[in-house]
Image (cartoon, helix red, strand yellow):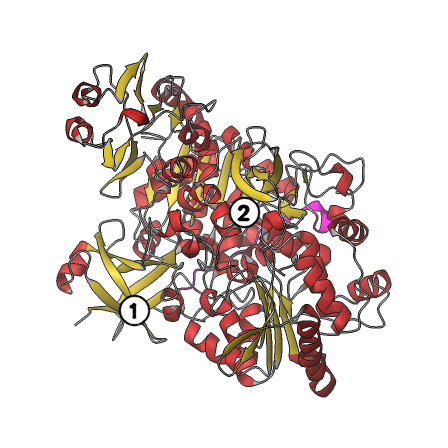
Amino acid sequence: MTVYVDINRCIGCRSCEVACQRVHGGSGHVRVSFVEGLASVPIFCHHCEEAFCAAACFSGALHKEGDRTAFDVDKCTGCGLCALACPFGVVWTEKIAHKCDLCWGRTEPACVATCPANALSTDGEPPSRQSQVRAGRAGASGCLR
Amino acid sequence: MTMVRIPTVCPYCGAGCGFFVEVEKGRATGIAYMPGHPVSEGSLCSKGNAALEILCHQERLKSPLKRKAEGWAEISWDEAAEMVARGMGETIKNDGPGKVALLASSKCTNEENYLIEKLARLLGTPHIDNCARLCHAPSVVGLNRTLGAAGMTNPIPDIADSQCIFIIGSNLAENHPIISRWIHRARDRGAVVIVADPRETHTSWMADQFLQLAPGTDVALLNGMAQVIIEEGLIDEDYIAERTRGFEELSASLKGLSIERTAQITGVPKEDIVRAARSYASSPASTILYSMGITQHTTGTDNVQAVSNLALICGQIGSPGTGVMPLRGQNNVQGACDMGALAEFYPGYRRADDPGTIEFFTSAWGAAALPAGPGLTATEMIGAAASGDIKAMYIVGEDPANSEPSSLRVKRALESLDFLVVQDIFMTATAQLADVVLPGAVWAEKEGSFTNTERRVQWSSKAVDPPGCALSDLEIVCIVGRSLGLDFSYPDAASVLAEINRTVPQYAGITRERLGEGGLVWPCPSPDHPGTPILHTTGFRLPDGRAQIVPVPYRPAAEGPGGDYPLVLTTGRVAVHHNAGSMTRRSASLISREPELFVEINTADAQRLRIADGDMVIVTTARGEAQASARLTERVKRGVVFMPFHFPGTNILTTEAADPEARIPEFKVSACKITRRG
């Protein structure tokens, strides 16, 4: 399972942040990033195919399990190498490593389920807007420039 | 260990999202989403996700309290009831019932609001109101006049069927985030989105056209658009002829208007006004969504009527994807109004100055006599408290000391009362001024119906008991009623709803048994009626079934910038806070994301004032001053500054100048100055 982001739909409401925090005992793994008050995008673990965090993890706590970059809490030493290795800044250590676990054990990640704007999805096919929009706009008002 | 999931309705905004509260051993342990919900489809915004933080909060009031010289003393319910009976009773006996005022709560259920307004009127006072006065009173007045019904004309999911969505004076992406999913759905189908706002907001990110108008110039913009539509022949002539009256007057009133002048007043380029007007008028289904950017003005009623005019001349009311959509801010502000917790209306919008209304309720309630209205509005009550015309108040689930404009004046007024009883879940700024404080319950600690912004009446179930000795607000109102000698012996919310079925025609068919998943949309006049998601499909509940077009000349806001106060302060909300903030400022995961009062200033203005991003500044108006951290931005134009009203500082600054009809204060326009804190 992968969580996809449709930046066109994100409204910066931070529901994903609060939902993630809620289901992870107060420690959330999503951060909504704002670009000069003009756009927003939720940032979280990409579960990289070649996961630098897992490569850096000498204890084997972070490791690949299929598509997922999984985390075995019992093996974590809290060394922080994963946080240094992650190119996206979405792994950090606070005694132990913290990162998105795709809500393992839930039917759907909380961030996806809660997103009011449908900006997050697991099907990877956000409604392709452009083609529909052009046709629709032409029908809606021929006067748009 | 068994865990049960109790269906509830979110306690925050008016969207009416559903979610389950997970309960184990009598304690709320979690939230589960509700994918089958017709509006939220299982999604929930940040506030909804944080709702349990309020339910289990350590600062919840757990016992009735009485004021003592050195603080507060816990008292029994018996003693509290006796004090309320004495405090209110003496005022009624010595000064007459007209010296008592009640504020009902748009956070409480329909049943509770019905009982609070009934309590007021059985005591003999017409002075009952709720905080709708501060958000959508102009919609009640304006839409009743133009369309014959005060509510959203179409349901929220219907927005997805719209081809042109015109959002004016609403930052719904932050304040009703769930509605954005329906707007996105319409966009996916090719709809055009137009946003008009003095500020670039998260909502404007969704816009194809963004009209950044000057605060308080909405009538000018809407009239300008109407004029373009009439001049270019884009009106719906058949609709105007068959369904409306007053078009000629409107047309005549707009004759002399020049688009250049409109552009000059609003600050919106004339090409943009023309383009927006053409898009709105020529789409097969256009809807207008609005909120407090329209209503919180001295011209609030005019603004609402100008919105109606635009929709009516284009025939954009009464079918799927069209409509006039006032988005309500509180979970039950629609219901509180429906239940007659308003100065000018008895339940079901029966006019309080109509002898027929008084006759009906005198008979229905078995009362000896009932007061005719209109009574004092929420804002007028504060003035009357200051002047001594109101001597005792019973305030349920409202925090006027933070939510009313010019709040230093409000606090002085409430302090001058002979007796104040406040019923709330936290020790709010208003409760701090009370003689007696009664601990109420939050949404999941009681059952009852809530009516969301689209008129959908939903039953919310009780998940857990209130903390300590706190009681449901229905039980408390019954205790207060009985202590004042009234027959308030309602065993539960269902028994009150049964009475509402008999007295409120719009709710006649909305019985407890029928309120299952998804609820029912009023008007629902009989037990076999399916409800009415779209209003005005065949006509209007006005003479001849015709809507009323009302010409509205543009008037500037009460306060303009100039002299000592060169900037215009406008107010609004942010995604992670709600209204006066008594809940969200106590919610750890929300307050941590927006911890303090800020003021947005245009970068050019800030440079001139030698203010850097993050500086602490003092914002001053004729009412007082407040401290805030400066945020430099291009989101507001030069000359305009923005502050969210979730923190106590903001409403110290706002003006009490009010709409002459709806009596809503002009929160959106105050003249101010800003200085860096020395």
Q: Which residues are magenta?
A: B541-555
- Chief SS of the magenta region: loop
Mark 1 is on which residue type?
Cys
**Residue B672 circle label:** 1
Mark 2 residue crowding within 10 angstroms, few (<14) / some (14–19) / many (20+) = many
Q: Quadrant of residue B440?
A: bottom right
Which residue occupies the foreground of this view, B47 or B286?
B47
Q: Which residue is mark 2?
A: B14
Q: Which residue does the image show at 32% across and 11% down from the upper left?
A: A66
Work out whether disc 2 and disc 1 sit on a shared chain. Answer: yes
Q: Quadrant of residue B96?
A: bottom right
Is label 1 in a helix, a strand or a loop?
strand
x then y, percent, for residue B165: 45, 37
Q: Is residue B130 left or right of residue B561?
A: right
Question: Is B535 one of the magenta-colored residues?
Answer: no
**Residue A79 circle label:** none
